[in-house]
Image: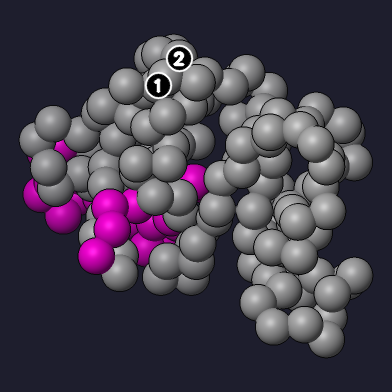
Amino acid sequence: MATDSVSIERIRTLLSESFCFQCPDHQGLRDSSCNLLCLDCYAAKQSAMCRWCVANHAPGHHHRFIQVRKCARHFAVRAEDLDTIIEISGMRKYIFNNSLVIYLNPRPLRSGSETNNSRGCRIICVTCARSLLLGHATFFSLRCKVFSRHIVM
């Protein structure tokens, strides 16, 4: 779908950013975990924000934000949120809290196995070689798709 595309540099910022830490400016307030990223700001020091920071961010301007969730100890984004900024077809989706999510980065492989192909999986990610259980998926995570040559934006 990708109706409001975002530059590849902004997507790379999303992939390299740290999330889900306590906001240093709003430590005493409820729900102050830094899990939001502005898709419209390109300042080098702009980083993850909590919901209280977002309330004061760029007043008078309509900025888009994407929320990052922690899913099985890894960062993920709801597929419907990501679909508005990048084409997500071919990416592995997981169900988390009744929503489809896509991992931002590949999960590490089990120690002792170079690929999951040794477990008999015939369908693997073209970038990280992680097993893909669904036949229509080509990429395990957003990073796998962005750093491959199959980028469709």
As drawn, the label of residue 153 is 2
Q: Secondary structure at mark 1?
A: loop
State which tag comes first along the sequence, 1 or 2: 1
On-image quarter of the N terminus = top left
Separation of marks 1 and 2 at Cα, in angstroms: 7 Å
Q: Nearer the viewer, mark 1 or mark 2?
A: 1
Residue 68 image offset from top left, x and y in percent? 54, 55
Q: Which mark is residue 126?
A: none
How many numbered discs?
2
Residue 11 lies in what quarter of the image? Answer: top right
Along the horizontal axis of the image, is 4 left or right of 64? left
Amino acid type assigned to the residue bearing label 1 in the image: Ala
**In the picture shown, does residue 106 fall above or below 64?**
below
Identify which residue, 115 or 25, lies in the foreground: 25
At horizontal 45% and vertical 50% (from top left) the residue drawn is 77
Q: What span is in magenta?
A: 98-123
Q: Nearer the viewer, residue 56 or 69?
A: 56
The answer to whether mark 1 and mark 2 are in CB contact below 8 A is yes
Q: Is residue 138 magenta?
A: no
Colouring convention used in this rendered image of the protein:
one colour
Q: Is residue 48 left or right of residue 147?
A: right
